[in-house]
């Protein structure tokens, strides 16, 4: 008789006391009971929550031995929570999903069936539409995917979610990428392997509020671009070279005009505008260089990606 295979579902949580009971009931009653041939491990990663998230998870673990938890000493961010979850997951297959039910748990079944019946190593979900988002947020999200794919040479699917189910060797490959500054969507694409995408319609949160503001998403986007491309550095260098050439041409033109018409080299207003323009370009280029230097500095410190306060 074949031994049952195990699916570990990694669930990052940060201040989600309202939605955890709803998520647990939906996952157990809607998915786990429908897959009796598979054992499940429900691994909650408490990312330093300040509400009752951890006590609620502990109560669930007391009544259900399938529920495991890892609690951080502080808020390290979702990327650290994903890495920790993959590190502690023990299943033959490992999945990642959000606790707010914007990732439909019902997709776990077709994901698992695809992994065992098709020639794929990972099955991931992507949104077929952004009907629930504001137009501005949706516009910038689409531009981001086009920009990062062009700058990195990767093919991150538009609307890609962290929601996915992977075979064990894919998880080991992701864990081998032990960098401190993490962008999981890029890492999943970078390690390769055959991935099948399952599109689904956008779903709203069942409770609570999103922890991702527009500004935080912008910073996260910059993290992804810097982490997987040196194109911004090349852009800064090309811009500097272009302005050097323009400055040389401008100097030649001014000298010729001065020789022919005299007095054409005067005009403090135009000079100030040029100084501001060129200074702005210089500061912008230095800022790009500083971002890469800062990321390198953080990597060389070799700080842990997360610190565990308690776990069962």
Image (cartoon, rainbow, N blue to C red):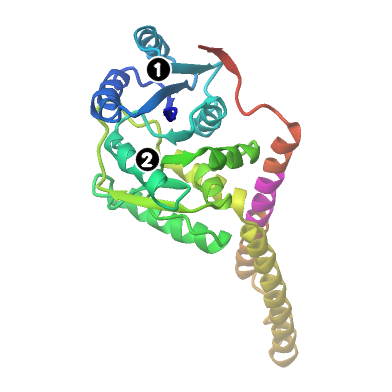
**Which comes before the other along the chain, label 2 or label 1?**
1
Q: Quadrant of residue 310?
A: top right
Above or below, 186 relative to 165: below
**Residue 312: image location, x then y, percent:** 50, 11
Task: Report the side of 192 relative to 200 (left or right).
Answer: right
Q: Residue at x 64, y 72 (%)?
A: 267
Q: Secondary structure at mark 2?
A: helix
Q: Residue at x 60, y 42 (%)?
A: 173
The residues tagged by marks 2 and 1 sit, at their Cα atoms, a distance apart of: 18 Å
Main SS category, magenta section? helix
Q: Which residues are magenta?
A: 284-293
User: Residue 8, can we see it?
Assistant: no
Q: Residue at x 59, y 38 (%)?
A: 172
Which label was assigned to residue 112?
A: 2
**Residue 146: image location, x then y, percent:** 45, 61
Indicate yes or no whether the magenta region holds residue 291: yes
Taking depth in this image into account, of 127 and 280 the one nearest to the observer is: 127
Q: To which residue does mark 1 refer?
A: 66
Task: Report the side of 1 relative to 25 (left or right).
Answer: right
**Residue 159: image location, x then y, percent:** 37, 51
Where the N terminus falls, by quadrant?
Answer: top left
User: Residue 80, can we see it?
Assistant: yes
Q: Residues within 10 Å of mark 1 (few under 14, many from 20)?
A: some
Q: Residue at x 31, y 38 (%)?
A: 109
């Amino acid at each position: 008789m074949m031994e049952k295979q195990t699916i570990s579902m990694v669930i990052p949580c940060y201040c989600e006391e309202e939605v955890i009971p709803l998520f647990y009931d939906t996952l157990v009653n809607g998915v786990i009971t429908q897959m009796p041939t598979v054992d499940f491990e429900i691994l909650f990663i408490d990312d330093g929550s300040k509400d009752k998230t951890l006590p609620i998870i502990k109560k669930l673990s007391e009544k259900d031995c399938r529920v495991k938890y890892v609690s951080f000493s502080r808020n390290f961010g979702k990327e650290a929570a994903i890495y920790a979850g993959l590190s502690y997951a023990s299943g033959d297959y490992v999945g990642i999903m959000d606790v707010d039910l914007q990732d439909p748990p019902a997709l776990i079944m077709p994901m698992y069936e695809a992994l065992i019946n098709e020639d794929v190593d990972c099955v991931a979900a992507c949104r077929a539409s952004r009907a629930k988002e504001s137009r501005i947020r949706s516009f910038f999200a689409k531009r981001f995917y086009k920009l990062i794919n062009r700058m990195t040479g990767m093919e991150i699917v538009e609307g890609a979610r962290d929601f996915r189910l992977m075979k064990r060797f894919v998880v080991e490959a992701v864990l081998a990428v032990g960098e401190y500054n993490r962008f999981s969507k890029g890492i999943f694409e970078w390690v390769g392997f055959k991935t099948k995408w399952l599109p689904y319609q956008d779903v709203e949160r069942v409770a609570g509020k999103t922890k991702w503001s527009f500004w935080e998403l912008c910073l996260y986007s910059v993290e992804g671009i810097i982490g997987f491309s040196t194109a911004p550095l090349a852009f800064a260098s090309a811009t500097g070279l272009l302005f050097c050439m323009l400055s040389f041409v401008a100097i030649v033109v001014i000298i010729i005009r001065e020789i022919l018409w005299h007095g054409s080299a005067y005009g403090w207003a135009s000079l100030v505008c040029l100084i501001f323009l060129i200074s702005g370009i210089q500061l912008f280029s230095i800022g790009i260089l500083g971002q890469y230097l800062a990321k390198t500095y953080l990597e060389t410190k070799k700080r842990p990606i997360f610190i565990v306060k308690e776990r069962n």
